Image (cartoon, rainbow, N blue to C red):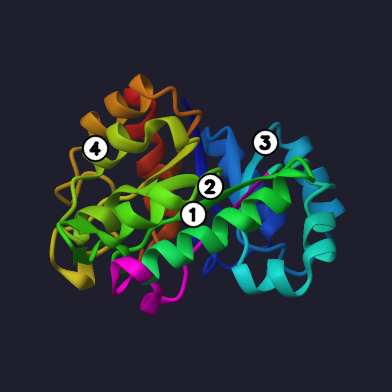
Amino acid sequence: MRAGIQLYTLRDVDESIIESIERVAGAGYEGVELAGFGEFKPAEVGEAIDEAGLEALAAHVGVDQLEDAYDETVAQFQPVHCADLVIPSYDHDAFETGAAAREAGRHLAGLADQLAEDDIQLHYHNHTFEFTKTNGDTAFDQFAHVADGLGLEIDTGLANNAGVDPVELIETYGDRVRMIHLTDSERGVWEHRHMDIGEGDVDVPAVFDAGKAADVEWIVFEHGLSEDPVASMEGAIEIMQEHL
């Protein structure tokens, strides 16, 4: 596995995306996951990633953006050599029942098939609401079961916050997981759904072991609630390098 970071983590730092890319390269990360291009053109961001010696490992893109402006959206990611797109969230109502979750899974599977024709792999990033219990399974399980061709980006902290063991998720779906979102959290405490790595109750060493066993390519740090994102980013890479 290689260490990456979701650049959304640094969104409140007073610097451009170009400067953030330089910062994470200097800290020791190998890849970045995009969440927009800021005020820059995709080609400019792609050039900055190349110059920093990094890889654009994936990008978060809303499902509405893909469906409303498919060609333009796909074209955006060619200059950054990004062939993996991630749906960062979905309609909460789609995971309230098993039937709705299966419908959502089939919907995104169709979008994944369309993107595959353009040599792009589509993934889905979980939050907490997908783990509603329905008919003995979680809505997430029913969603994933019918979503053939859809990759799964497991967010460890959000799964843990919802009361689900992220290690078991990785072990269950490892053949569909190219990227793990390494986040920490306190189980059941919404205000602590993202924490600095090591401050919550996610079993971080076990996450790395499960990722390695599943041949996951990237482990991607994210902290969506950090009050000091630079410190969180720097602390995370030290822990990640200990386990890689």
Q: Which residue is denoted by mark 2 in the rendering?
A: 150
How many C-alpha atoms fall within 10 Å of the one at disc 4: few (<14), some, or many (≥20)? many
Q: Which residue is mark 1?
A: 124
Position of 209 with respect to 238 (left or right) is left
The mark closer to the camera, 3 or 4, is: 4
* Mark 4, secondary structure of its residue: helix
Of badges 4 and 1, nearer the viewer stands 1
Viewer-nearest of labels 3 and 1?
1
> Is the C terminus in the top left, top right, bottom left or bottom right quadrant?
top left
For disc 4, the marked residue is 167
Three-letter amino acid code at the position of disc 2: Leu
Residue 86 belongs to magenta span: yes
Whole-number angstrom distance, CA of label 2 to CA of label 4: 20 Å
Specify start and end residues of the magenta stretch as a single range: 84-99
The percent coordinates of residue 130 (x first, y second) are 32, 64
Q: Which residue is mark 3?
A: 55
Q: Residue at x 63, y 51 (%)?
A: 112
